[in-house]
Image (cartoon, grey):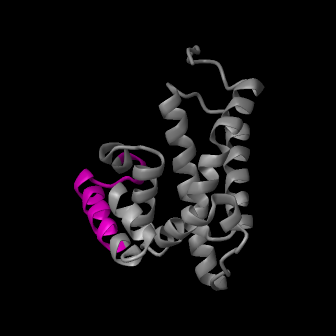
Amino acid sequence: MERKKDTYLSDSDIVRIVETYSDMLLRIALNRVKSLAAAEDVVQTVFERLMRRRPIFESREHEKAWLIRVAVNLCLSDLRTESRRGELPLDENIAGEFGDDSFEVLDAVRNLPVQDRYAVYLYYYEGYGVKDIGKLLKEPEGTVSSRLSRARKKLKALLEGGNHGRQIQQRL
């Protein structure tokens, strides 16, 4: 991804970014908005901003972090709007997209507080470290570690007993 500082993203760069990060951004958005249609809107808006602004990225990690930050901000904005208009029902079609086992775990993650949910998703699903999550969420590393610790305990309690509880406990 070597590029001169004064050049912008090309159309082929944008196509590559959309193909590479669409699924990840959809999963991040689904973690927050709970509606497939709203999550798709978030992803579409992220890519719309990418095409309109055509930012210059220093590396692939910078590119990925920018996309995640925009998605998280849009989800938070949606949360504020949603609180004014009321809760939207959970889209039952999501189960088919992630499989039955994943859906139960994902559903448990969705029951976590918003910031804990982001930390868990970024740590376990996207492989970010505590330091990187802190930068993305603009929180100290200690806060992220505390969030992950509390979230692990909550998830174990939510999933305890059944087969899913053992699976998540092995991962955590």
At x 52%, y 65%, the residue is: 106
Measured as percent of width and height from the top left, residue 42 is found at: 67, 57
Q: Which of 58 and 118 is in front in this view?
A: 118
Point 37% across, 77% down: residue: 161
Residue nearer the viewer, 58 or 25: 25
Q: Name the residue located 69 percent from the left edge and 59 percent from the top edge.
A: 97
Q: In which quarter of the image is the C terminus?
A: bottom left
Residue lying furthest left:
142
Residue 132 locus on image (x, y percent): 36, 43
Most extreme residue toward the right, as rendered? 11
Dominant SS of magenta comes to helix
Tell me the quadrant of the picture where the N terminus can be found: top right
Q: Is residue 129 above or below residue 12?
A: below
Instruction: Measuring from the top left, give residue 131's x and y in whole percent.
Output: 30, 44
Answer above or below: position of 30 versus 47.
below
Rendered image quadrant of residue 57 = top right
Residue 73 x/y as whole percent? 54, 57
Residue drawn at the location 58% of the way across and 28% of the way down: 56
Q: Which residues lie in the magenta part?
A: 135-154
